[in-house]
Structure formats: C-alpha cells, structure tokens
C-alpha cells in the first residue's frame, strides 16, 4: 500500500481541468461553491469557479494525522497554529461571503465536503508511507536486542511515545487484511521515507545470532545419503561445523584440482519453534569455493552479478539499502527467477545481509 508523508488537502474545482463526470460529482459534493459566467474579450463564454481550501495537514512518524483548518476559505497561513483532529475542520460557525454577498457557513461546507467527497480519512490512510516488515517471533534474541537498541538509540523517548513496530516489536499485524496472532511479532525495517527504522540493527543482530547458533547445532541436522558417505571417510572431520569465530584458515579436506574438491555436503533439519515457517525444512551446506571470503561475499551481494551463478535468474534489484560499509552490508532486494518447466516468473523479496565474522569469514 502506498502512502505519502505530508499532504495538502486543498480541493479546487475548474471546468477546464476536470471531466464532465468529475464536475458533476464535485458540484453535488460542494453545494456552496458557486459558478459565475464570464465573457472574455473575444466574446467567448467561460465559467469561473471559486475554490475552497479545507485544510493542510501532515503525518507524524506513527501515522497520526494533524490538520490545520482554513477558516476563511483560503489556504491556511503557514504561521497558523490552529491544529484540529480529523473529525472536524472548524470549531465554530465561521462564515464567508460568496459573490452574491450571501453568507455560507464554513463549518457546514467542510462537513458536507468531508461527508460527500471520498472520505478524508480514507484518502489519507491510503496514502500513508508504506513499511517493510520482518517477523521476529522466532528469533530468541530479539527481545534483548530491542532492549539494547532502545537504550543506545532512542532512550529519550517515553514509554507512551514508543510506536509499535518502529520502536518495539508488536503482535499487531502490519496489514489490516491479516488476522491478529498474539504469538506473532513484527518489526518495521524502514520508516516509510526510504530510511531504515530504529530497530533494523536489533532485528538483523537477532537474525544473525539465531542463524549462527542453528548452523553449529549438530543435533538439529541430518546428513543426506551422499553426505553421510563422505563424512565416514574422515576427510572432512576438521572442516565441518568449524566455529565461525575461530581464527586462522579453514583446513581443506582435498588438494586443489582433485576430484574431491567438488564435494558438496548437505544436511536437512527442522526448527524447534512453532511459529510461521516451522514446518518448512531448513538446509545446511558446506563445500569448497576457490575464492576468498571477501570476493565471495562481494559476488553474492552484487545484484548485477546474480546471473553469474544462478542461470534461472531474470535479474535482481535493490530497493533499499539499510546499511553499507566495507565489512557489513544489509539491503532489501527483489529477485526474479524463471525455473524451467514452470512457465512463469517467480518474484521474491529478500533481506540480504553480509558481515565479517570474528574469525575473518
């Protein structure tokens, strides 16, 4: 859903800028707006319309709407401090004169416009900034990471000022079409303006910690048939399940250029949690890649090079970079793949993260 951060709710009617259908609809919605025939120098007849500004307004970071009313039928002054809620546009029976000298209530005009035009509230909500979310209920370290992030990044905010998803994980679904699950937890990755949200580092840290812990949990994984035979040879004993924080090069089980260099070890496992995706198998692989860790990381993170290693890829685009430096990159990308025999293109949105580990990997 697309949204905007700031808006100007100024509705004007012009017989030369709208279609007849829209003109009829607006004339019913704004009965107080009068049309006056005008004869120009060439004798041509045209119609002039008065335009009335209802209000200007803005969104806060949490999506709260603030409107500043235009009490005299004109756009509000930028110095006006009259801010009102979405429920009304005027607190009094202020009035204005039309071209015939008749007075019309600004209050009734605005109430009529709000009621008969596309509801103001619906228009605003449909244009609020969209956000990208990540599930965090299955990340055991998320609560601790969020607590640390608050004390280091936005400790000045009072508890009542913390916004769900933005400053704290929340079970409230990010979309109204989703059912509420009290066991779920959601975090916003962006603030709606193309910037990362305050809890991005916390969510990524919890995700990395969970992934590394799982990858080293031998009890979680079952080797497939071919992998079990390779492991029995004993050649990979010093290589598989090597801790990521161990300093020094990883022992190579085979000499460069030998047949065994092409071995790929595969394990499958199941997650212990019962949240979304727990029924999907997890896959773990180890193999020899004749590249430095930095070169491999650069290859995998460069969206323009996806086709070098994925022949089914149609392309991948980065839609938002959350963090980028020499040792860490976090971004959101949309990849397209066209598997053979499927007959259609698959579109997947991914959170990609690369960081240098303590052991240099």
Image: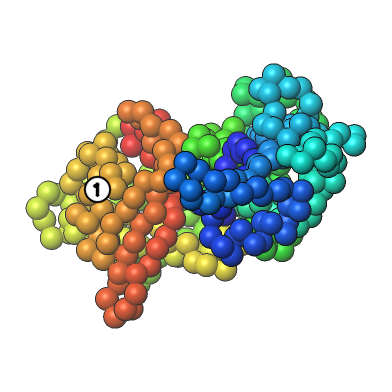
* Above or below, 111 relative to 200: below
Q: Quadrant of the C terminus?
A: top left
Return the x and y of residue 66 as percentages of the image width and height: 73, 35
Instruction: Read off the residue under disc 1.
Output: 304
Position of 29 with respect to 243 (left or right) is: right
Q: Nearer the viewer, residue 49 or 297?
A: 49
Task: Please give the name of the residue rendered at 70% of the width and 28% of the height, measured from the top-left corner.
Answer: 76
* Mark 1, other Cα within 10 Å: few <14 / some 14–19 / many ≥20: few
* Above or below, 336 relative to 167: below
Q: Nearer the viewer, residue 227 or 292?
A: 292
Q: Quadrant of residue 8?
A: top right
Q: How was this image coloured?
A: rainbow
Position of 75 with respect to 331 (left or right) is: right
Return the x and y of residue 132 as percentages of the image width and height: 54, 48
* Above or below, 196 relative to 308: above
Residue 247 seen in render: no
Query: What is the tally of numbered marks visible in this picture?
Result: 1
Task: Please give the name of the residue rendered at 30% of the width and 69% of the height, measured from the top-left corner.
Answer: 338
Task: Please give the name of the residue rendered at 43% of the width and 42% of the height, measured from the top-left corner.
Answer: 320
Return the x and y of residue 133 as percentages of the image width and height: 57, 49
């Amino acid at each position: 859903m697309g949204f905007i951060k700031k808006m100007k709710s100024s509705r004007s009617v012009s017989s030369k800028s709208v279609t007849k259908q829209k003109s009829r609809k607006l004339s019913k919605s704004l009965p107080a707006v009068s049309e006056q025939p005008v004869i120009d120098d060439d004798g041509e007849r045209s119609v002039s319309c008065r335009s009335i500004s209802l209000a200007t307004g803005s969104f806060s970071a949490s999506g709260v709407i603030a409107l500043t009313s235009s009490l005299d039928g004109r756009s509000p002054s930028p110095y006006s401090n009259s801010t009102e809620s979405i429920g009304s546009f005027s607190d009094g029976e202020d009035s204005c004169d039309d071209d015939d000298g008749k007075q019309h209530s600004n209050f009734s005009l605005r109430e009529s416009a709000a009621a008969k035009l596309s509801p103001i509230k619906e228009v605003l909500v449909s244009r609020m900034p969209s956000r990208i979310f990540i599930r965090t209920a299955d990340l055991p370290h998320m609560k601790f990471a969020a607590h640390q992030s608050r004390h280091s990044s936005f400790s000045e905010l009072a508890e009542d000022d913390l916004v769900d998803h933005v400053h704290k994980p929340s079970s409230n679904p990010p979309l109204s079409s989703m059912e509420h699950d009290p066991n779920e937890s959601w975090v916003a990755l962006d603030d709606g303006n193309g910037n990362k949200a305050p809890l991005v580092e916390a969510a990524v840290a919890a995700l990395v910690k969970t992934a590394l812990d799982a990858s080293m949990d031998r009890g979680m994984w079952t080797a497939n048939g071919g992998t079990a035979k390779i492991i029995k040879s004993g050649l990979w004993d010093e290589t598989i399940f090597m801790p990521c924080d161990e300093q020094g090069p990883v022992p190579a089980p085979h000499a460069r250029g030998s047949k065994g260099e092409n071995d790929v070890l595969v394990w499958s496992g199941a997650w212990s949690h019962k949240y979304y995706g727990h029924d999907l198998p997890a896959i773990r692989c180890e193999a020899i890649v004749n590249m430095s860790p930095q070169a491999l990381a650069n290859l995998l993170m460069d969206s323009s090079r996806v086709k070098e290693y994925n022949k089914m890829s149609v392309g991948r685009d980065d839609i938002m970079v959350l963090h980028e430096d020499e040792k860490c990159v976090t971004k959101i990308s949309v990849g397209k793949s066209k598997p053979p025999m499927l007959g259609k293109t698959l579109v997947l949105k991914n959170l990609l993260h690369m960081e240098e580990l303590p052991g240099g990997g």
